Image (cartoon, helix red, strand yellow):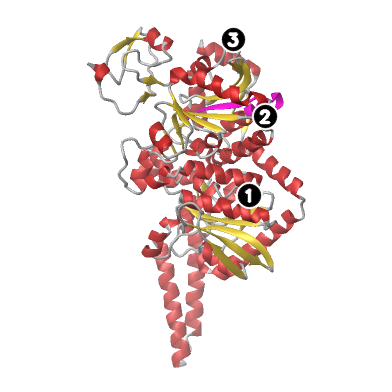
């Protein structure tokens, strides 16, 4: 999005004029107003008809708010818990106790880094087996004390390295899924940025799944799909479109429950407003879930995941024809 | 002499040619071997011991009591929820695979006896779009587990899968959640679930249902892991050891219980089932 730079420049220019206006007492209000109108027009033009690939870029935007930003904004208190009790503390997945309007909840969040240094420590938000094992033990804590669970998904994928395989990353994801499937407390998963494949789903098997408007959730990155299915790196935007990975598509497909609006251009343009909208949605979803008794909660969750998938019955005559064709 | 070739890890050949000749060349030892002999030998090269991959049908034959098989797969096929087109429309790929294999999708569910013990088995077939798990595979697995619950018998899954069916997008990813949810029901019913990992068991299948067996057995020569060699080299350019994601690697790191040769797998299951006889 090279045009985004134009917008940033214009915004900076307006800010500059505002300062001049305030400092020197020069009356620049009409110039400022003109520029602001122009800015709004450009913004609409740029963001109103985003392609799916452009949304992927927003979901990965370096200024996009991360899990800890939302945690700080939405909850009155956050008490981080560390470590998987076996091996290490994976900083790509933060976990802890939090207060949501006075109630205690357990929060899991996939966390990317802002700086190179922080990204090194947080593996660019790619969760390792130790992270999923931390998630599991904190989920068990939530169940023990009947705390609802909120997860925030934002990862390119599980960390795909040798150390991950040595510590059985696949098994750790599977165990995290199993723990979420049988959890006897309500859970809400929110995709805040990138929902990257199994590494995202591992903390996403929740009673309700919510996405921010510019978040994505996908079985494979568009880059991966372009390489494997199209065998052509240039086809990334086509792959992004074909995967139906945006919040709006997934809502229409019935795979998620709600979409939380973001300001034009993405959550980073007005973080407070986004966090506020997210908190409202979270309270609504949790409120509905907390009205259910445990049996109902579990049977609804089971029904939801048991039903997921699309297939057609093959008519008996078709089967015979196919058999004939094979012979 | 091929037979003395120092081969540290077993290779499993998935490109079994479909021509009608009587002989085939083993890619591992380069010997011309008589096809019928290979087949009678569980698709293992009689010369060098190389494993050729098994179709679902051949896998059933290998594991179950003769004449005990009842196919309980549902006649269902993917409805292409994303209208997915890459180089080919997804329905064309499905039809192609159906024609080539005679299967509905990448798994066959059957009721059968193993050493006289009734079981439900799900056997994946790698020929069908790389054994990938989409809506149909997920649904069949779940119905298989439910059939096991209904008849109070063990469930055995033989995996051979590259992972999720990419053309079904998030529907495919969510089959991981679906199969895990039903696996929990099997656990609640206190019915044993044995997961047999063959070449290859990776991606979404390995990171869900296949890793949740009460007992996990790898067939010798299996490839087991979450992210393939290419993904790792592409994302973090890390050097990987030769035995990366082999059966030996998974065993050494505690991801599986045992490694068993193809020839011994049936006997292995019979003895294992013997330990669980009392709970049914």
User: What's the distance in space between the residues labelled 2 and 1, CA to CA?
Assistant: 22 Å
User: What's the distance in space between the residues labelled 1 and 3, CA to CA?
Assistant: 43 Å
Nearest to viewer (mark 2 / mark 1): 2
Crowding at mark 1 (Cα within 10 Å: few <14, some 14-19, many 20+): many
| Residue identifier under label 1 | A206
**Tag 1 secondary structure:** loop
Crowding at mark 3 (Cα within 10 Å: few <14, some 14-19, many 20+): few
Crowding at mark 2 (Cα within 10 Å: few <14, some 14-19, many 20+): some
Estimate the x, y position of residue B185 in percent, counting from the top left.
Answer: 67, 36
Q: Which chain is home to disc 3?
A: B
B261 over A213 or under it: above or below: above
The residue positioned farthest toward the bottom in the image shown = A25
Q: Nearer the viewer, residue A100 or A240?
A: A100
Please indicate, yes or no, whether residue A254 appears anywhere in the rendered image: no
* Residue contact between numbered discs 2 and 1, judged by CB atoms under 8 Å: no
Residue stretch in magenta: B143-160
Q: Which chain is home to disc 2?
A: B
Q: Is residue B55 magenta?
A: no
| Residue identifier under label 3 | B67
Q: Quadrant of residue B226?
A: top left
| Residue identifier under label 2 | B146
**Tag 2 secondary structure:** helix
User: What residue lies at 68% left-to-right and 45% top-to-bottom?
Assistant: A301
Q: Is residue B158 magenta?
A: yes
Q: How many marks?
A: 3
């Amino acid at each position: 999005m090279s045009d985004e730079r134009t917008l940033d420049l214009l915004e900076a220019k307006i800010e500059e004029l505002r300062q001049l206006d305030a400092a020197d007492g020069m009356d620049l209000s009409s110039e400022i107003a003109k520029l602001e109108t122009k800015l709004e027009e450009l913004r609409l033009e740029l963001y109103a008809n985003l392609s799916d690939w452009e949304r992927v870029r927003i979901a990965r935007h370096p200024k996009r708010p991360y899990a800890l930003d939302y945690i700080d904004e939405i909850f009155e208190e956050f008490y981080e818990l560390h470590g998987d009790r076996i091996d290490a503390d994976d900083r790509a997945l933060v976990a802890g106790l939090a207060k949501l309007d006075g109630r205690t909840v357990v929060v899991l969040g996939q966390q990317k880094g802002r700086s190179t240094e922080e990204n090194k420590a947080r593996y660019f938000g790619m969760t390792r087996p130790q992270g999923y094992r931390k998630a599991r033990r904190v989920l068990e804590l939530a169940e023990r004390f009947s705390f609802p669970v909120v997860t925030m998904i934002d990862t390119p994928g599980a960390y795909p390295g040798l150390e991950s395989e040595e510590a059985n990353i696949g098994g750790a994801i599977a165990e995290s899924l199993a723990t979420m499937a049988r959890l006897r407390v309500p859970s809400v998963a929110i995709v805040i940025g990138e929902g990257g494949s199994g590494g995202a789903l591992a903390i996403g098997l929740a009673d309700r799944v919510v996405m921010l408007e510019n978040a994505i959730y996908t079985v494979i990155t568009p880059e991966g799909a372009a390489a494997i299915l199209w065998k052509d790196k240039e086809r990334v935007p086509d792959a992004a479109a074909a995967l139906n990975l945006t919040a709006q598509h997934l809502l229409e497909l019935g795979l998620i429950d709600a979409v939380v609006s973001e300001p034009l251009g993405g959550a980073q343009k007005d973080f407070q407003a986004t966090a506020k909208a997210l908190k409202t949605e979270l309270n609504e979803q949790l409120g509905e879930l907390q009205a259910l008794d445990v049996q109902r909660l579990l049977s609804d969750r089971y029904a939801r995941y048991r039903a997921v998938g699309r297939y057609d019955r093959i008519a008996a005559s078709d089967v015979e024809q196919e058999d004939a064709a094979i012979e | 002499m091929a037979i003395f070739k120092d081969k540290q890890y077993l290779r499993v050949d998935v490109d079994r040619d479909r021509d009608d000749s009587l002989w085939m060349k083993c890619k591992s030892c380069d010997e011309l071997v008589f096809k019928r002999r290979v087949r009678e030998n569980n698709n293992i090269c009689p010369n060098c011991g190389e494993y050729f991959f098994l179709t679902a049908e051949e896998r059933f034959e290998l594991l179950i009591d003769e004449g005990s098989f009842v196919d309980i797969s549902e006649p269902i096929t993917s409805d292409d929820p994303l209208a997915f087109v890459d180089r080919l429309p997804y329905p064309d790929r499905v039809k192609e695979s159906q024609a080539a294999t005679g299967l509905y999708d990448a798994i066959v569910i059957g009721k059968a006896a193993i050493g006289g013990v009734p079981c439900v088995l799900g056997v994946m077939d790698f020929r069908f779009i790389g054994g990938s798990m989409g809506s149909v595979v997920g649904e069949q697995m779940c119905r298989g587990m439910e059939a096991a619950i209904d008849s109070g018998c063990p469930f055995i899954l033989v995996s051979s899968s590259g992972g999720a069916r990419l053309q079904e997008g998030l529907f495919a990813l969510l089959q991981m959640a679906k199969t895990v949810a039903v696996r929990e029901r099997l656990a609640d019913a206190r019915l044993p679930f044995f997961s047999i990992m063959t070449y290859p068991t990776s991606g979404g299948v390995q990171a869900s249902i296949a890793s949740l067996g009460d007992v996990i057995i790898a067939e010798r020569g299996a490839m087991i892991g979450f992210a393939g060699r290419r993904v790792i080299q592409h994302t973090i350019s890390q050097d990987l050891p030769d035995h990366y994601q082999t059966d030996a690697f998974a065993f050494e790191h505690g991801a599986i219980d045992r490694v068993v040769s193809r020839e011994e797998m049936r006997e292995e299951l019979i003895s294992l089932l013997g330990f669980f006889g009392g709970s049914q």
